[in-house]
Amino acid sequence: MFSASFIFNFLNRQLGVVLSLSGMGAALYLTPHCPTIGFLYAVTALLGLSNGIYNVSQTVWVIEMWEGEAGPWIQGAHFSYAVGTLIPSLLLGPFLTKESDDENGSTTAMPPKNERMWIPFTVVGIIVTIAVVIQSYLFAFQRYVPLLESEQLDLERSNNNIQSKDPDKLESTPPRKEMNPKYLKWTLIVLSAKFLGFYSGMEMVSFQFISIFAQFGELGFSESQGAQVITALTGSYAVGRGVGIFAILKIPPQFMLGVNLIILFAASIVLLVIGNSTVGLWVGVCLLGIGYSTVNPSFCAYIARHLKFTNAIGSLMIVSGSVVGAIFPIVIGKQIEENPTVLTYVNLLSTSLITVAILIILKLTYSRNKTLSKMV
């Protein structure tokens, strides 16, 4: 992912999207046909690299085009992603076993279906291929050309000149004395990386392990039922992001973030206290999906107003999420079959940490805005 910070300094971002989508499509086609574990690792690395480059490019691209007005467009992009997360669980469900553990801990043998796993991977690969065709057409006939840095500076100076024509403001405005801009910039970068790191890791392991949580918990769900749990999570996730597209037009992103964090705390408590009941599990999972739904786009919409996103900054933030996302599965994977509640405790800890991070960010940005308003 971090390579994208350098790649897009020399490569057209739109072409980078085409190439990264092509890499993802190729990896999906190849995954069910890997002859050796080493080949599977190589294909997985290609998928991860392509996905990382795409994440950096589309996030920075949207913010670059819309800047402070990027909120609804970020929400729309993430809504499309949320709808896409519904597809794998729906496709994979019929190819997974439907037996569950009986009281003696034994299972009923089912005929293996692994030889047909190429079908869902191919279907998803075709969907990605369609995206490659669309983006290739746009690159060929509707190419996006970003403003040069000099043009951006000229535009900013033009805007400043227009504002300075007000004689009242010209006479009453003293020289601006802001807090150290470098200190503020790097503090926001570090806190944002912390926020996105722990949030991305938490979201990643929830989607990865929620079915195992249901299977190895007291309810003992089957693999097929576990896929249904994932569908409930991704379905509520998509609904929340669909609502977020319109909510961001009227509601400040920081307020939406606060609501999301409250819901995430509630979801973890529900799963921890009554997650061993059928109703408690489904309610907790749906709350988890709604809580996750607009955290990332709302945060990006807010921080884009106070921090200029570049390829390097975007890469740093996404890499931080990947690092935490790589550590969390190691921690949870070793324990979740014996102690499924470890997933809930990790979510509670992560929610607490990102809450602290966003509160500090809000304090810094509000203090700066208040200082600037007194100087105008």
Image (cartoon, grey):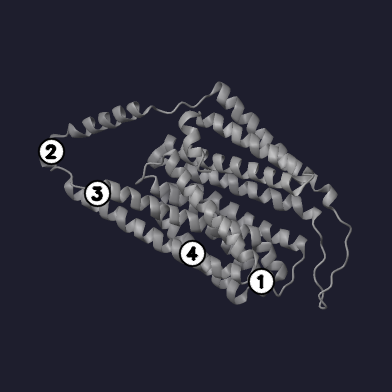
- The amino acid sitting under disc 3 is Asn
Dot 4, how many residues are within 10 Å of its Cα: few (below 14), some (14-19), or many (20+)?
A: many
Q: Which mark is residue 351?
A: 4
- The amino acid sitting under disc 2 is Asp
Q: CA distance from mark 3 to mark 2?
A: 28 Å
Q: Which mark is residue 311?
A: none
Q: CA distance from mark 1 to mark 2?
A: 63 Å
Total numbered circles: 4
Q: CA distance from mark 1 to mark 4?
A: 23 Å
The C terminus, quarter of image: top left
Residue 37 left/right relative to 141? right
- The amino acid sitting under disc 1 is Val
Q: Which residue is disc 1 drawn over?
A: 279
Q: Which label lies toward us, 1 or 3?
A: 3
* N-term-proximal mark, 3 vs 2: 2
Q: Which residue is disc 3 drawn over?
A: 180
- The amino acid sitting under disc 4 is Thr
